Image: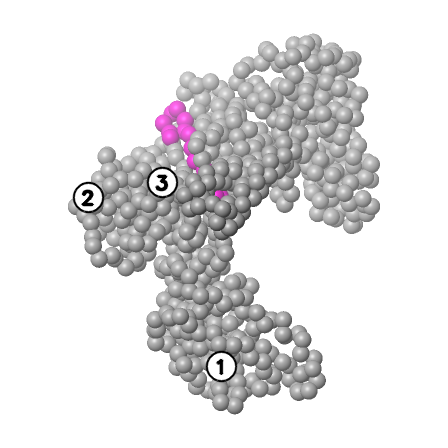
Amino acid sequence: MSNALAPMKLDDVRSGEQGELIQLVSFNLAQEEYGVDVLKVREIIRMPTITRVPNTPHYVEGVINLRGKVIPIINMRKRFCLADAEYDKQTRIMVMDVGGELMGFIVDAVSEVIRISSSEIQPSPAVVSSGIDQECIAGVINQAERLLVLLELEKIFTQDERQLFSNL
Amino acid sequence: MPIDCEDQELLEGFLTETTELLEKLDDDLVALEKTPSDTDLLNQIFRSIHTVKGASSFLGFDLLVRVTHKTEDVLNRLRKGELLVTPEIMDVVLEATDLVKTLVADIKGGDIVDREIDETVNKLIPLLTEQVQQPPADPVVEPIAAEVNIEPPPAAAPSAPSEPSAAAGQPTAQPEPPSPTAPLPPAVSAAPAAKKTAPPKPADNKGGDDLSDSSTVRVDVKRLDDLMNQVGELVLERNRMIQLNQDLQGGSSDQILFGEEFGKLTKRMNFVTSELQMQVLKMRMIPVEKVFKKFPRIVRSLSRDLGKEVDLQIFGEETELDRSVVDEIGDPLIHLIRNAMDHGLETPEERLAAGKPRTGTLVLAAVHEGNSIIISIKDDGRGIDTERVGRKAIEKGLITEEQLAAMSQREMFDLIFLPGFSTKDKASDLSGRGVGMDVVKTNIKKLNGLIEIKSEKGLGSEFILRLPLTLAIIQSLLVEVEGEVYSIPLSSVLETLRVDQRQFHVVGGQEVLKLRESVLPLIRLEQVFKVQPAAERDDFCYVVVIGAADKRVGLVVTRLVGQQEVAIKSLGNYLANIPGIAGSTILGDGRVTLIVDPVGMIDSGDNAAAGR
């Protein structure tokens, strides 16, 4: 992956603009584009066989075997209360590091790694796309034609949900 | 005061050795009290203390030297027959040993605390001048006093190699009395005898790993060699596999030949890996002695506190089990022993009145059975009085009269495991809070173990613990529930049945199956796990009878898939606490399968029953 790019140009750009350079992986979810910090993304894989885990919140799709490690899979559409969609050729699982643990997130498609300056991040407007909890939105990036919602994965589960997980 | 020691390695060596010696010392001291004439044992104790003293003076631990020096002097007098072994002297010696332990623990902690040692030392000092009241009646003391080196008779040979480390720097090596412990009553000698034959090897190698410090393991060199051999074989098989693949790719081998060769390779790989697995498992194994050796001391002090006479017999302490299990069973066993001493055994007077021998017997035994270890604690005390237990349970509001009336004897025994249950009216510092048995049950459950009680009023009780050998790799039964595969730990599976669903009965909203003489509550896995039902349904289904701790339920599944050895994988923090799921594992085809938690299942069965 393009992690290697990160440190290379950091200094050049930093001296040119104000604000830190951030690399984001952008992915699609119900026609919207989202971004997460590239350093949080461990790998991007195609859909494997998912084993359902009973008695979990509806957005926990199950668990998969990632080279001998069992990791939970979260359906992003369900998590954000978006309309369900069939998995297709574009569907990917983004394996990410959330608070020190690996987790997989099902997204419609992963598009690219983009570089932005932190000064481009604007605070999220009061009402963003349907259903997504405000908490995990770190900001919005407005780049020419596209609008990117920056997600902060550490906050993808609310306090209540974390509680729920540990008390299940 | 931080420890100023130049050579960290030296210090670590000292700590490991000392801890080992001290662990053994407790056991030996208690054994010595039982068999005061066992001069061999006394010498061994003396050497242990002497070694600790020597090492600590070399490293400059002054407090330690002072205590051990005085203890050594007392032991020396015992050895020379100037003093006789009495419970009072043993009390003081044991106290000193405890103090030594505390001091060593301080050193281990990296900080020497200036502890008050004078009190204990002062107790030792009078023993140094005290004159023996009567001359030693036992002639076997003679050769010891003279410190003669006598070649050990063949009968004692196995005990000789067990103490080379202690004997190394000692001029007084192995003075073996000509007639050692022969005239002892067999019951008393049982425990020390077992000790002598069993641990000679462990003492040299695997017995070295330390419970209080489980981060390092000492492994028998032979085991390591075996392991290396296995790995070598594995490498050979891998090379063979690469070769086969190359031949197939290069076209120098056809499909049929390849298939044949690959089949053979699979078999050998299977053999080598299972051997390897066994080897690694074995390295994790430690003898249950690690836990058992604390008990003579505990029993001794309890019997003195309670005024009861107890003969503790230990069998099968060489039985090995996984260290993870060993770490967990200590507490429950202590509780069970306390329980047996406090509630089970009677006072000498009561025993005599009941026509039993004055001294009660407590038998602690461990044995392997298949893939589990069975530990039993048996006393010949008064047994469990189910009537009294039932009455107390009602008094404490744990059950109702109707519930009690409907209970079988087995269920009544189970009442003692209820949290808050106690037959004592007043809590003492020993028992009566109703916590102990609950702890036992919880810990055993945690280990996926079963607990069984056998008891007869007036004759005694036996607690039987059945525990898995290891927690990392388990035998499991794969079952299919409407298309989904789940794995059930085989250690909890008691039996499987194929039954017609029409044979199920419903009692108070709970499905049950009449199984021989008993009524088995049923849990439908597809309901618990909310599985989408498959289209076609069969009247026949399978019932897997599982048991954990002291309860049994039947799990209704669609089909049995087979038995497989699986490695347990955690589900991670986020999914760690799903009811009814203990973990997950990966099958041969790479799919993840969830492992059913029998304990959770049984509890949920309880709740369902309670809720009706």
Q: Crowdedness of circle 3 by 10 Å Cα count: few (<14), some, many (20+)?
A: some
Residue at mark 3:
B493
**Residue occupying the far bottom of the picture:** A144
Picture layout, residue B339 above or below residue A167:
above
Exactly how many numbered labels are in the figure? 3
- What residue is at 43 percent from the left and 86 percent from the top? A127
- How far, Cα to Cα, is label 3 from label 1? 51 Å
With A116 as the anchor, is B537 left or right in this view? left
Q: Residue A149 carries which label?
A: 1
| Image point (57%, 18%), residue name | B189
Q: Which chain carries label 3?
A: B
Task: Tell me if residue B378 is in the magenta stretch.
Answer: no
Amino acid at dot 1? Val
Mark seen at residue B500:
2
Task: Report helix, strand or loop for mark 2.
Answer: strand
Q: In which quarter of the image is residue B466?
A: top left
Q: B583 and B149: which one is in front?
A: B583
Mark 3 against mark 1, which lies toward the viewer? 1
